[in-house]
Image (cartoon, rainbow, N blue to C red):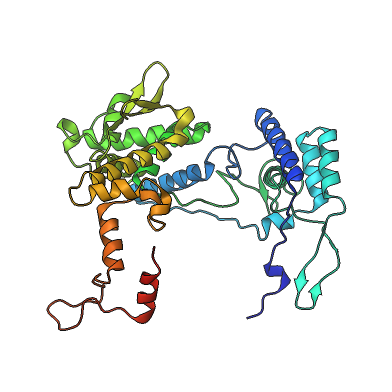
């Protein structure tokens, strides 16, 4: 199959000085755009907060509500083909001017894009310089904010009138972004996503999050819950009113509740509602110094929980009578075992698998019980791979 040039995108490879300058420049433009509300709150792509997760949450809520009420739900997905590469340079400068970007800043961006060229390596060698008159530079830190401001101008102005327009007709746009993000189903990531949703700067997202959480708890205890009881729900409380089955659909909140129940077998943490600050907190009872994760530091939840899980598994493995001393020795330095990388993320089942594989006595999935076949049968390639392990 032959791939045409249209299937490829040019990449901008800046030198160190250019990257530093562009990074400082984009920080100032982004800060200016946020302070002066030059970007719609519905634009989540390439923003400081994980807005794509908020999009997925809002979509999930709309689908769940439609299922509960047995109603139809219609959604329109708009795809911008070659989005980064299709915006004309002149339109970018015009969009910046309409957004109110200072003229000095526009002049710098114009200088960066004026005279831009690309070259393509073919079977016959490199082509000559090809003028670039459209598209933001992929690989440049400035590209994201320039694309956002340009997209904002397209959606707000349409053809002739203010507001969001498509094919000459005004429409309501709930949210938009370059890409949607698949939410992680890991227990630690779920706890972080929940805290971020409840503490979102987007009032629409945070309001929907609070309302849907209270609705989930209401179906559980059959009355209007307090915010403290919402925290009990997230902690996986199973006594008294929380012992009954709600019969509701599986939601983000019930998934977070189940994940908290799973994590509680290994770690000690809980959700707390702070009346004075009117927000949820996650308390991590780490030894010797407990940690209280506020909404402003929600991004640390996953890292803290994963670190604690690693410590739990390593401590469990080190405490084994037959393997503990070995783990204690080889984990002292990464050079002692390249495959295990100093013992990080190591559980006993991993340790057991690796050494059985090295000794050639690992029973394969194709091994049949009570048969005369050799359970250690490995083909030549497998033996070569195992023999190369450190």
Percent of width and height locating residue 62: 43, 46
**Residue at 17%, 39% in the rendered image:** 244
**Residue at 70%, 74% in the rendered image:** 4
The quadrant where residue 17 appears: top right
The quadrant where residue 247 appears: top left
**Residue at 76%, 70% in the rendered image:** 121
Is 119 on the left or on the right of 61, as rendered? right
Relative to 123, residue 303 above or below: above
**Residue at 77%, 46% in the rendered image:** 160
Specify the quadrant that holds the C terminus: bottom left
Percent of width and height locating residue 234: 30, 35
Is 127 on the left or on the right of 285, as rendered? right
Q: Is residue 358 visible?
A: yes
Give the residue furthest to the bottom.
Answer: 372
Q: Is residue 256 visible?
A: no
* Relative depth, front residue between 358 and 125: 358
Percent of width and height locating residue 355: 28, 62
Give the residue furthest to the left.
Answer: 370
Is 155 on the left or on the right of 388, as rendered? right
Percent of width and height locating residue 226: 30, 24
* Relative depth, front residue between 215 and 336: 336
The quadrant where residue 126 appears: bottom right
Specify the quadrant that holds the N terminus: bottom right
Figure label count: 0
Relative to 311, residue 73 above or below: below
């Amino acid at each position: 199959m032959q791939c045409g040039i249209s299937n490829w995108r040019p990449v901008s490879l800046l030198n160190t000085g250019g990257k530093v300058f562009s990074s400082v420049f984009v920080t100032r433009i982004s800060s200016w755009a946020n302070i002066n509300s030059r970007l719609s709150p519905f634009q989540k792509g390439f923003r400081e907060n994980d807005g794509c997760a908020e999009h997925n949450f809002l979509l999930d809520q709309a689908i769940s509500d439609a299922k509960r009420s047995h109603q139809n739900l219609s959604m329109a997905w708009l795809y911008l083909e070659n989005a980064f590469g299709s915006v004309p340079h002149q339109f970018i400068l015009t969009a910046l001017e309409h957004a109110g970007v200072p003229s000095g800043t526009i002049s710098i961006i114009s200088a960066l894009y004026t005279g831009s060229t690309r070259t393509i390596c073919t079977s016959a060698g490199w082509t000559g310089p090809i003028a670039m008159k459209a598209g933001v530079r992929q690989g440049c830190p400035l590209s994201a904010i320039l694309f956002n401001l340009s997209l904002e101008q397209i959606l707000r102005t349409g053809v002739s009138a203010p507001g969001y327009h498509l094919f000459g007709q005004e429409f309501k746009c709930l949210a938009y972004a370059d890409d949607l993000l698949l939410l992680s189903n890991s227990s630690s990531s779920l706890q972080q996503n929940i805290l971020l949703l409840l503490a979102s700067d987007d009032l629409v997202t945070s309001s929907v999050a609070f309302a849907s959480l209270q609705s989930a708890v209401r179906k559980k205890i059959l009355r209007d819950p307090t915010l403290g009881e919402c925290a009990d729900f997230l902690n996986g409380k199973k006594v008294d009113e929380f012992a009954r089955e709600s019969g509701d659909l599986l939601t983000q909140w019930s998934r977070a509740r189940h994940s908290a129940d799973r994590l509680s077998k290994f770690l000690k943490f809980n959700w707390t509602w702070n009346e004075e600050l009117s927000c949820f907190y996650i308390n991590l009872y780490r030894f010797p110094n407990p940690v209280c994760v506020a909404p402003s530091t929600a991004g640390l939840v996953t890292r803290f929980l994963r670190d604690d899980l690693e410590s739990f598994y390593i401590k469990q493995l080190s405490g084994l009578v037959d393997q503990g001393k070995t783990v204690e020795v080889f984990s002292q330095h990464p050079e002692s075992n390249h495959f295990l990388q100093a013992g990080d993320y190591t559980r006993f089942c991993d340790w057991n698998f690796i050494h059985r594989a090295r000794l050639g006595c690992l029973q394969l999935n194709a091994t049949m019980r009570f048969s005369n076949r050799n359970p250690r049968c490995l083909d030549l390639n497998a033996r070569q791979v195992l023999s190369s392990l450190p």
